[in-house]
Image (spheres, helix red, strand yellow):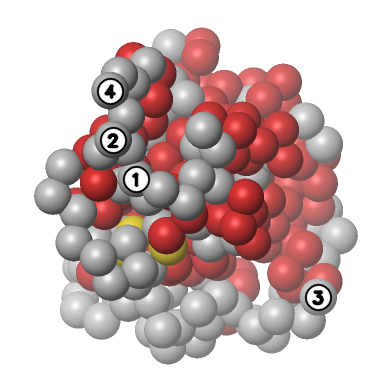
């Protein structure tokens, strides 16, 4: 299938709509998705399928009823994903060629199309717009990592959607060396806790309950049993940290959480 001028024009319209949120990623994205791509991926069937899939999906989504802010979010996420894909190609990374971009059964959609649509639809509804860049990273990295099968990809998208931006910051925090500076006792002996502290502990406990964090081998029974310095990102939490590139959470956002967990 050949992407027509209409699909390319639609990509430009969406990325332009999301440019205020995407910043410099908007212009960089057109190098991969524009009419005159700066990166030639001739010879890479998977690379061509990925670019074409993004263009055609953008055209389909544009035909649906979208509010102005929804267009901005989809356009920004598309730009972030394309920019990251472009950067990985420039770095010499190879797009996966394990059948992810092709249909195994007649009439079935390629897994890549389903994943791309899932992420962009999540982005459409995402009111915490700081998450959009990390959705773009997730799309890009799944496209290069054959160890992530379609079922895992859908799970990661659903988890990412259901976590707050601050929970993404917490996954980044508990995978970093900042844990050394966190509170080294639990909160059991604290007579009162500020409502803001309780809210943060609720988010930590939710991550623990989902299996995304561990407490250095200890069992957490209630919120006050949380010892911030002992929390570590684990399992699927590590996958999210890696594929969403949460190490790139802005330092000021990370330090805000660090400071809240010191006392």
Relative to residue 30, is residue 210 depicted above or below?
Answer: below
Q: Secondary structure at mark 2?
A: loop
CA distance separating discs 4 and 2: 6 Å
Dot 4: within a 10 Å radius of its alpha carbon, few (fewer than 14), some, or many (20 or more) residues?
few
Relative to residue 205, is residue 66 depicted above or below?
Answer: above
* Pointer 2 residue: 189
- Dots 4 and 2: beta carbons under 8 Å? yes
CA distance separating discs 2 and 1: 8 Å
* Pointer 3 residue: 91
Query: Looking at the picture, how far across and down is residue 91, in whole percent?
Result: 81, 75
- Dots 2 and 1: beta carbons under 8 Å? yes
Q: Is residue 188 visible?
A: yes
Query: Quick one: 35 or 67, which is closer to the camera?
Result: 67
Labels 4 and 3: the sequence-earlier one: 3
Dot 1: within a 10 Å radius of its alpha carbon, few (fewer than 14), some, or many (20 or more) residues?
some
Dot 3: within a 10 Å radius of its alpha carbon, few (fewer than 14), some, or many (20 or more) residues?
few
CA distance separating discs 2 and 3: 51 Å
């Amino acid at each position: 299938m050949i992407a027509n001028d209409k699909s390319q024009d639609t990509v430009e319209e969406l990325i332009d709509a999301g440019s205020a949120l995407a910043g410099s990623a908007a212009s960089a994205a057109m190098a991969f998705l524009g009419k005159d791509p700066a990166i030639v991926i001739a010879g890479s069937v998977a690379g061509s399928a990925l670019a074409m899939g993004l263009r055609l999906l953008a055209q389909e989504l544009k035909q649906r009823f979208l509010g102005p802010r929804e267009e901005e979010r989809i356009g920004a996420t598309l730009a972030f994903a394309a920019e990251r894909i472009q950067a990985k190609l420039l770095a010499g990374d190879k797009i996966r060629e394990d059948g992810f971009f092709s249909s195994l059964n007649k009439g079935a959609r390629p897994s890549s199309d389903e994943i791309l649509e899932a992420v962009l639809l999540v982005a459409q509804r995402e009111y915490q717009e700081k998450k959009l860049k990390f959705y773009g990273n997730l799309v890009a990295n799944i496209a290069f990592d054959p160890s992530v099968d379609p079922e895992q990809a859908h799970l990661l998208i659903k988890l990412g959607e259901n976590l707050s931006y601050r929970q993404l910051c917490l996954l980044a925090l508990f995978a970093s060396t900042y844990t050394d500076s966190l509170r080294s006792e639990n909160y059991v002996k604290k007579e009162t806790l500020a409502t803001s502290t309780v809210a943060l502990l609720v988010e930590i406990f939710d991550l623990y309950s989902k299996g995304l964090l561990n407490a250095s081998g200890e069992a957490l029974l209630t919120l006050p049993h949380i010892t911030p310095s002992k929390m570590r990102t684990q399992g699927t939490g590590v996958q999210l940290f890696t594929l969403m590139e949460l190490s790139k959470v802005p330092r000021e956002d990370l330090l805000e959480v660090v400071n809240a967990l010191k006392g």
